[in-house]
Amino acid sequence: MILFILTILLQVGLQSVESAASNSLSDCNAVATKFRNTCNGIAVNNITATTGTNVSCSSGFTSTTCPGTMYGSTCVFQHKLCVTCSSSTTIRIRVQSNGLPLFCPNTPATIKELNVDFEVNFNPNVNVNSPVQNPTTSSQLNSIVCNISSQASVPSASNYVSYSSSGSFNTLAGISVDGVTILNVNSVNNVDPFYPTGNYASELVDACLGHPNAASNGYHYHIASGCPLNPPTGMIGSCKSTPSCNASIANYSISKFSSYRTLTVIGIAKDGHVIYGPYDSTGTEVTSGFDICNGMFYDSIGNYAYFATRTFPYITGCFGPGNYPSFLPSCTTNKPAAYTKSIYAGK
């Protein structure tokens, strides 16, 4: 009898360690429905050639900066997004977006329509004992998480394929549920854009925490924004002119999820893992349990995802899973307290 019980316990233990992630077609479709799609559930040939949702901005744009068409003093552009799942041996998720949000960004710089189109394995199985990123020195950690190019390559297990006609998007980390690109957390100086070390100035963003980049004029996020879940109407202000944002952009970011204190999909990473807001399924803000990439094993099934946090790298700093070293990155003044395993990651 004792031998029988030990055998059952061993089998249960092995099952929990080797259990597969939730990556069925229905799991994928459940995530895809969280996106502000403008298609009918079928991947399109060219997202920019489709009809999207009109966004009208009565101020803040000129004929040069408007990503659509000017009608008098009003800029009208279209948000276009199509996130779909397909079934084969491995479930795949395809993301097609023109990168334009459902609100009026506040920026003096030009914003342009993009053509983001990639396909990747949905929520691929990963193991805490086989980290993709495993730095053993501070220098190695910095070369990963303090490196704007660190997400140019995607782990082979994700089978990432780009169909984009707008370039390689080497700094792309993922796509938000509103179709706006999430870029690698670092500035071009390889430091935290909001809490940089050295003599670098903090980068300017609007009240939705986005701004365009110089390379493609694509509007993007580096830090979690509540605007994709609840798009504001009218022209928004800048972060600098919004007292709570100007005081602490990190705290402001998390505060915008006060109505979403549960496991909330806010995007999909380029490696196929889901990006969640700052709260877990119990309504607790995620302040620990994540690795160097900001990823966490968050349930007993074996699911791994990225979570929005109020510390660097805010959404994701690399494609994980990563390890849990005792040292911290030197490119930010807003470091996490520590890298610690969640209760589901094992000991």
Image: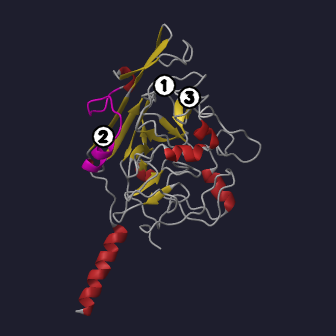
At label 2, which amino acid type do we have? Thr
Q: Is residue 28 left or right of residue 188?
A: left
In the rendered view, tell whether residue 74 sits above or below residue 265: above
Predominant secondary structure, magenta span: loop
What residue is rendered at 72% in x and 38% in y? Answer: 201
Query: Could you classify mark 3 by the number of other residues whose Cα lies within 10 Å: few (under 14), some (14-19), or many (20 or more)?
Result: some
What residue is rendered at 44% in x and 39% in y? Answer: 176
Judged from the image, the secondary structure of the residue bearing numbered disc 1 is loop
Q: Which residue is mark 3?
A: 237
Is 31 in the magenta? Answer: yes
Say the numbered circle drawn on residue 275.
none
Pointers 1 and 2 in contact (C-beta within 8 Å)? no
Front one among 13 and 344: 344
Range of the magenta residues?
26-45
Front one among 344 and 118: 344
Judged from the image, the secondary structure of the residue bearing numbered disc 3 is loop
Q: Is residue 153 visible?
A: no
At label 1, which amino acid type do we have? Cys
Front one among 30 and 132: 30
Kindly report the distance in space between the C-alpha atoms of the residues bearing marks 2 and 3. 29 Å
The mark nearer the N terminus, 2 or 3, is 2
Quadrant of the image occupied by residue 4: bottom left
Q: Which residue is mark 2?
A: 33
Q: Position of residue 166 (x, y in %)?
A: 49, 28
Kindly report the distance in space between the C-alpha atoms of the residues bearing marks 3 and 1. 10 Å
In front: label 3 or label 1: 3
Q: Position of residue 335 (x, y in %)?
A: 63, 55
At label 3, which amino acid type do we have? Gly
Judged from the image, the secondary structure of the residue bearing numbered disc 2 is loop
Q: Position of residue 136 (x, y in %)?
A: 63, 65
Q: Which residue is mark 1?
A: 104
